[in-house]
Amino acid sequence: MKAQPTASHFINGRYVEDKAGAEIPVYYPATGEVIAVVHEATPAIIDQALASAKAAQAQWAAMSGTERGRILRRAADIMRVRNHDLSVLETLDTGKPYQETSVVDATSGADALEYFGGLAGGLTGQHIRLPDGNWAYTIREPLGVCVGIGAWNYPTQIACWKGAPALACGNAMVFKPSETTPLCALKVAEILHEAGLPAGLYNVIQGRGGVGAPLVADARVNKVSLTGSVPTGRKVYAAAADGMKHVTMELGGKSPLIIFDDADLESAVSGAILGNFYSSGQVCSNGTRVFVQRGIKQAFLSRLSERLQNAVIGDPMDPATNFGPMVSEGQLQIVLNYIAKGQDEGAQLVCGGQRLDKPGYWITPAVFADVTDDMAIAREEIFGPVMSVLDFDTEAEALARANDTEFGLAAGVFTNDLQRAHRVAEGFEAGTCYINTYNDAPVEVPFGGSKMSGVGRENSHAAIAHYSQLKSVFVRMGALEAPF
């Protein structure tokens, strides 16, 4: 099974190869076989990408928002027509089941292109009336050249979530996908330019951290948007701050999911499954600390264990498969180490957590009960299919414990008491909250975190503020006086 791209990079409207860069093998997580090889961007490739973005951006910014939006909407249409092929590539790149990628990944990318394409024509400033007949107006301007750095769990979606608002606002982008999943972003670039995007405005270059660092530090770059871990975010944020660059940091989490004893049990179990085992647990916003009110603990664990028997673990290309492998051997080992640590610290492994004896990076979904707040599995982001179930008695206790973390990406609550639902949502120290659901991410709604989980927001009107800046112009209508 091969997925070798036309070339490693997409720069100035065409595929570009430079084999002087180090090889990056691409593994199919379901089998462990190498399905493609790309080359890391050399300094010459990095410079070529930034130079083309810089050269193309001014003319793009001079176009009307309606013209820019028309191209983005056309790209969305192309992406939807090619959803099957893009979903197959996403499955090859990440190992996620086709059942999932066919309805989430390219489709959500297309949603972002369509949404921001629709907003582009309405990105205007304001008229401000002032005393004495004076007035002012504002102009919303693009930032310039934006750098996007993607994570490996949603390569197509992230490439669009960053590219769509950047382009709608009149910016150019250089996007570096994760070295683990380098294939999908190339197709996004290809589709954008097929839709009429002028050359140079959306460039994709490959590489590890050694490529990301010079991108972030380059004086031609005005904005950096990262999706990644907190340690990586610290480094990128600090490097961007040195040049006073605009930043969006969408980082990790250890999000709480609180289930009260009056919640609908089936819905709560569904929320816990979606918040822990979708994408084999490799979702930054996952609600991996599941606080279950003591009165329904046993019923919850029993029904959860029953439902997990319905997990179909098999060929990710089979539409019946609904649970796939981990993305890499390294990530699998991280998860296995945490499972061992959870057992060593005294948590009860209710089910799962075993590596399957087959090629690839397979593990069964794991559920721990009797977890306490100080255990590593309850405090550290695992990024794998490991659920920690914690007992609680009162609302105040659950909320205090839920917020006792350095992270603040997401949080959820299940209850049939709507007053309590809104009260708890207001009390959460998290940027993205859910009531009687979990991990929905429509493009119309802002997504992002607080505390160590990041700064800024992706999606919705809120993203426009992070990819543009306001210029204020004061107009005096009469004579101007001075003291001398």
Image (cartoon, grey):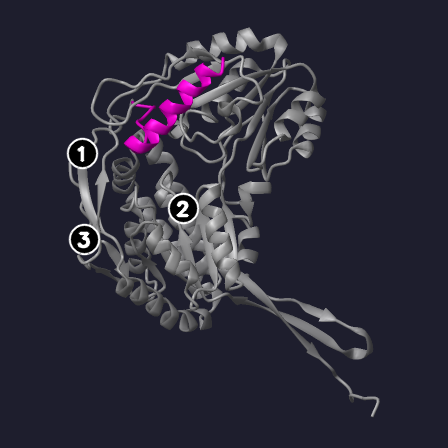
| Quadrant of the rendered image containing residue 261 | top right
**Extreme front residue here?**
344
Residue linked to disc 2: 158
Neighbourhood count class around disc 3 (C-alpha, 10 Å): few under 14, some 14–19, many 20 upward: few
Q: Secondary structure beneath disc 2?
A: helix
Q: Amino acid at mark 1?
A: Glu
Q: Is residue 301 visible?
A: yes
Rendered position, 440 above or below 267: below
The answer to whether 483 appears left or right of 469 in the picture is right
Q: Amino acid at mark 2?
A: Ile
- Please provide the residue range marked out in magenta: 321-346
Distance, label 2 to label 3, CA atoms, is 21 Å
N-terminal-most mark, 1 or 3:
3
Residue linked to disc 3: 6
At which x and y percent is residue 482? 81, 88
Return the residue nearer the eye: 246 or 274.
246
| Pointer 1 with pointer 3, Cβ within 8 A | no
Rendered position, 293 above or below 115: above
Residue linked to disc 1: 33
N-terminal-most mark, 1 or 2:
1
The answer to whether 467 appears left or right of 399 in the picture is left
Q: Is residue 441 magenta?
A: no
Distance, label 1 to label 2, CA atoms, is 25 Å
